Image (tube, rainbow, N blue to C red):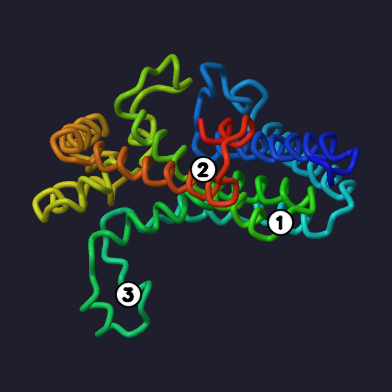
Amino acid sequence: LPRQRPDLPQTQRRLAEISEMIHTASLFHDDVIDKSDTRRNRPAVHTVFGNKMAILAGDYLLARASISLARLRNVEVVETMSTIIEHLVRGEVMQMKPLDDGSDTSKALFQDETHAKSLRVRQQPLEYYLRKNFYKTASLMANSCKSTALLSDAPDDIIAASYRYGKHVGLAFQLVDDYLDYTGDATSLGKPLLADLHAGLSTAPVLFASSQSSALHETLQPLMARKFRGDGAHVTQEMDVETAVQLVRESDGLELTKRLAWVHVNKAIESIVKVFPEASVHRDALIH
């Protein structure tokens, strides 16, 4: 760009490295919390070096990322990127204390109990889950894209479009990951299929299935409440998982997940096309 300062490409590459350090640190911590044995078809760090070393390694990466971020000498970028770390923690807490177990959440959202009773809807766990996805996944992409625009002293409309682009790409990415957990290939995914269900997580396909009818909701709600771990008596974890998978596949849960992913893909494209209406190699690379 004519107005671009000479060191901008190098500075933006450094920002990309910072984003990757934050992301990798979060994976080290997540694998310990989720007790995941593998990451991308390889042993997770904590299975090789132990939990303490994995946590310390994640902390070290966050520390190095913070130092590198400070050296960019841009206060607004520092504030924006620091928000990612806050959101990662918030998202992890939401995942540990989910509202997606099928229970009524209206009282948590509305202080007035009378008002809450009149507004009870089964969609609330899905909305909570999507917000958690923003904190754990989309915030990293949204604020990294925004910071890239801030470093280039871009106009406000381009900064806002960069944020929206990263946000919707991040949300679409997580929804596709949810979809592939039921339909993908373990080798290409780098993790076993149905890993989320075995970890006790109610992702978009099962939440969509639960919201489709009272019958599905009543069947899936107890499974989600006990995190697909069985009832401790006659029903095992595998039986819970098999039941959930069957109901998801018999419903429109997978199709609705895919449709919502496409909604976010199209919103990401729209955010770029709006500020860059003319085709270019760089714009089209973001779209395709």
On the question of residue 32 being in view, the answer is no
Q: Secondary structure at mark 3?
A: helix
The residue to which callout 1 is attached is 80
User: In the shown orientation, is residue 25 left or right of residue 268?
Assistant: right
Where does the image place residue 23, in percent across and percent down from the top left? 64, 38
Q: Quadrant of residue 182?
A: top left
The residue to which callout 2 is attached is 170
Mark 3 vs mark 1: give the one in front: 1
Mark 1–mark 2 contact, CB under 8 Å? no
Q: Secondary structure at mark 1?
A: helix
User: In the shown orientation, is residue 261 left or right of residue 25?
Assistant: left
Where does the image place residue 248, in percent across and percent down from the top left? 20, 37
Seen from the viewer's position, the closer of residues 229 and 192 is: 192
What residue type is disc 2 on?
Answer: Gly
What residue type is disc 3 on?
Answer: Lys
Mark 3–mark 1 Cα distance, whole angstroms, equals: 33 Å
The residue to which callout 3 is attached is 107
